[in-house]
Image (cartoon, rainbow, N blue to C red):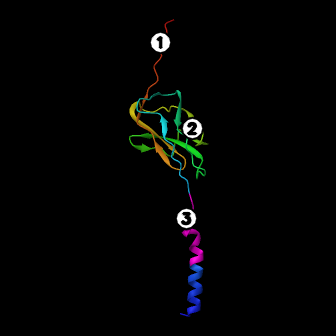
Amino acid sequence: MNPILFVLFALFSFTSALPTLIAYKRDVYVPPITSPTQDTIWTIGTQVNVTWDTSNPPAQITNGLGKIVLVTDGLLDYENPIAANFSILDGFHTITVPDVAPKNDYAIVLFGDSGNRSQNFTIQAAPVAAPTST
């Protein structure tokens, strides 16, 4: 191979790859979830606040839109979020507790730049209204 062509090819390859070699600073924001906690009990159909600590956000957040996903039996229902498209810097989002089987091993994951899982908590059935007599 011609040495000049080899050098030109090597130089072209290096300059083409240069953007991938430069380290871009990316700030991943994983705010700690403050509610729900292990002592939390949600009732199906009620409105509750999911909260997280926004006291130390980075200067450049890669993805500022949040998504809240319910975790059931250790599995994330990512296709059916209970909330989406809110600012991760809000620190809270009000949701309606979904109609799911009552049990005590639910969790939520807050997605933005990254996912942050809550502690397990309980979702209980809504109280049944007593029949009225006429």
55 lies left or right of 119: right
Q: Position of residue 107 (x, y in %)?
A: 43, 38
Local SS, label 3:
loop
Rendered image quadrant of residue 18: bottom right
Numbered tag placed on residue 23 in the rendering: 3
Rendered view: 20 above or below 132: below
Residue stretch rendered in magenta on the structure: 14-25
Q: Main secondary structure of the magenta part?
A: helix
Q: Is residue 132 magenta?
A: no
Q: Is residue 24 magenta?
A: yes
Task: Identify which residue is drawn at 47% across, 12% down.
Answer: 131
CA–CA distance between discs 2 and 3? 30 Å
**Which residue corresponds to mark 1?**
131
Local SS, label 1:
loop
Which dot, 1 or 3, sits closer to the camera?
3
Front-most of residues 13 and 98: 13
Q: Position of residue 49 (x, y in %)?
A: 54, 31
User: Disc 1 or 2, which lies upstream in sequence?
Assistant: 2
Mark 3 is on which residue type?
Answer: Ala
Task: Identify which residue is drawn at 39% across, 31% down.
Answer: 103
Which dot, 1 or 2, sits closer to the camera?
2
Mark 2 is on which residue type?
Answer: Gly
Q: Position of residue 53 (x, y in %)?
A: 53, 39
Q: CB under 8 Å between callouts 2 and 3?
A: no
Front-most of residues 131 and 4: 4
User: Disc 2 or 3, which lies upstream in sequence?
Assistant: 3
Q: CB under 8 Å between callouts 1 and 2?
A: no
**Which residue corresponds to mark 2?**
91
Mark 1 is on which residue type?
Answer: Pro
